[in-house]
């Protein structure tokens, strides 16, 4: 096994040699109190000045997975139902998606209907805890959904014969003809703090038998270059990019390489492309201004809900305080905070050794009278008003 490890993996194993450490990590997390106060739901956002028209429902799936649903449309941010233990992760042991765990979660938590309405799956980066379960979920539950993400994501998913061919944003109009189920968001579509990206209309990814309703609202997305901080002790697991199509999906946890990192704006817009509700989504921590949209975009429409990553936050100075102050969202949902080496549970423990008191302090520092943050339990559901 040692001969299979990269220098990064060997360095990690040298520090955490025995799997007994993995159990110890879980015990530490369970034994210690924390400051995040998980919310089980349900919850409805504040009153609209002109009344609540439609409602957006957000269902937390744990880690950074969310189902964002408006009527018969939904967007899924890459979920993780499989839960390899810490030893499996650092040892680079063979591991594939736990399809039994996925089926069990979908059944027990009544997710089938929501997943059946998913039009797009958004992938921010390609680590196992964001991409491992996506191929099975797309093929088994979402039907005609399109998977959007980075070049590395596209090269990895090429290893699944059911997901070929892989498309690109410069040929969005050809998706129906080629039955493309994976779209790589190319660099000229990706923005940053100083430059706009290009909007991608999710309505285009509907099935051939769909008839768009010109009076209805629909989703669109824009990607921004983001970053991924080190996991622990200055080391990032699964570093690097994949630069050529794989023939098969990775067979080990660290075969799911980090790759490029994107954050997203998810807008619910009317037929005039006027934003009626805006969500910011980010599945990794990173130093500012990585992941920041241009300020002028935020002036056109404020962020109603920001979904941000908590894991490894203390490896980034000023995160997430500066991000929240920049976005000024009405609500902040703190994701990727729970110990994902354990099975999901109510009131779960946080990521091992996370300084939850410091995270809460930074979040509270960023708050104003018009913003608030919350930490969902896995499978918590929240409803937000799309104001008239």
Image (spheres, rainbow, N blue to C red):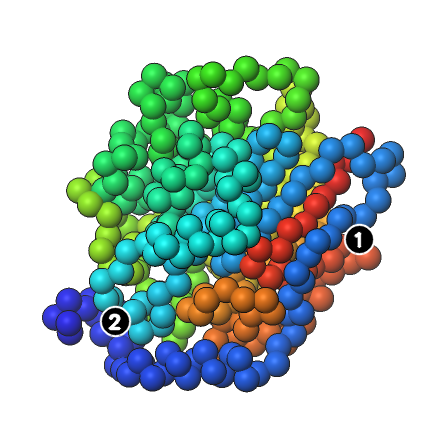
Q: Residues within 10 Å of mark 2 (few under 14, many from 20)?
A: many
SS category of the residue bearing label 1:
loop
Q: Is residue 64 visible?
A: no
Of mark 1 and mark 2, the one earlier in the sequence is 2
Q: Is residue 324 above or below residue 383?
A: below
Q: What x and y, as percent, mark residue 195? A: 52, 37
Pointer 2: what residue? Answer: 91
Report the front residue among 167 and 212: 212
Q: Residue at x 50, y 64 (%)?
A: 344
Give the mark count. 2
Which is closer to the viewer, label 1 or label 2? 2
SS category of the residue bearing label 2:
helix
Pointer 1: what residue? Answer: 370
Q: Residue at x 43, y 45 (%)?
A: 123
Q: Is residue 151 left or right of residue 173?
A: left
In the picture, the disc for residue 379 is none
Placement of the N terminus among the 4 image quadrants: bottom left
Residue furthest toward the right? 49
Report the front residue among 186 and 354: 354
């Amino acid at each position: 096994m040692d001969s299979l490890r990269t220098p990064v993996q060997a360095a990690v194993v040298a520090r955490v040699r025995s799997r007994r450490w993995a159990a110890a990590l879980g015990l530490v997390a369970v034994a210690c109190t924390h400051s995040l106060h998980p919310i089980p739901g349900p919850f409805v956002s504040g009153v609209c000045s002109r009344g609540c028209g439609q409602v957006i429902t957000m269902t937390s799936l744990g880690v950074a997975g969310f189902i964002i649903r408006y009527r018969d449309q939904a967007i899924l941010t890459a979920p993780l139902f499989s839960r390899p233990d810490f030893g499996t992760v650092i040892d680079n042991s063979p591991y594939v998606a736990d399809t039994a765990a996925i089926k069990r979660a979908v059944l027990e938590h009544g997710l089938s209907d929501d997943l059946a309405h998913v039009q797009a799956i958004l992938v921010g980066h390609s680590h196992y805890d964001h991409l491992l379960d996506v191929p099975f979920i797309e093929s088994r539950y979402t039907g005609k959904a399109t998977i959007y993400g980075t070049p590395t994501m596209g090269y990895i998913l090429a290893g699944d014969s059911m997901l070929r061919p892989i498309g690109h944003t410069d040929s969005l109009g050809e998706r129906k003809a080629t039955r493309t189920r994976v779209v790589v968001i190319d660099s000229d579509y990706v923005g940053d703090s100083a430059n706009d990206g290009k909007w991608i209309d999710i309505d285009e990814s509907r099935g051939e038998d769909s008839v768009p309703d010109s009076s209805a609202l629909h989703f669109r997305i824009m990607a921004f270059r983001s970053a991924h901080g080190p996991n622990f002790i200055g080391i990032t697991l699964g570093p690097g990019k994949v630069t050529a199509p794989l023939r098969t999906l990775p067979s080990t946890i660290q075969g799911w390489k980090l790759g490029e990192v994107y954050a997203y704006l998810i807008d619910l817009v009317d037929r005039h492309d006027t934003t009626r509700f805006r969500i910011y989504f980010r599945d990794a921590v990173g130093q500012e201004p990585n992941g920041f949209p241009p300020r002028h975009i935020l002036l056109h429409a404020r962020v109603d809900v920001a979904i941000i990553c908590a894991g490894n936050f203390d490896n980034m100075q000023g995160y997430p305080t500066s991000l929240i102050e920049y976005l000024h969202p009405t609500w902040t949902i703190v994701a990727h905070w729970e110990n994902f080496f354990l099975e999901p549970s109510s009131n779960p423990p946080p990521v091992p050794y996370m300084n939850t008191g410091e995270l809460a302090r930074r979040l509270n520092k960023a708050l104003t009278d018009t913003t608030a943050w919350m930490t969902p339990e896995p499978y918590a559901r929240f409803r937000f008003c799309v104001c008239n």
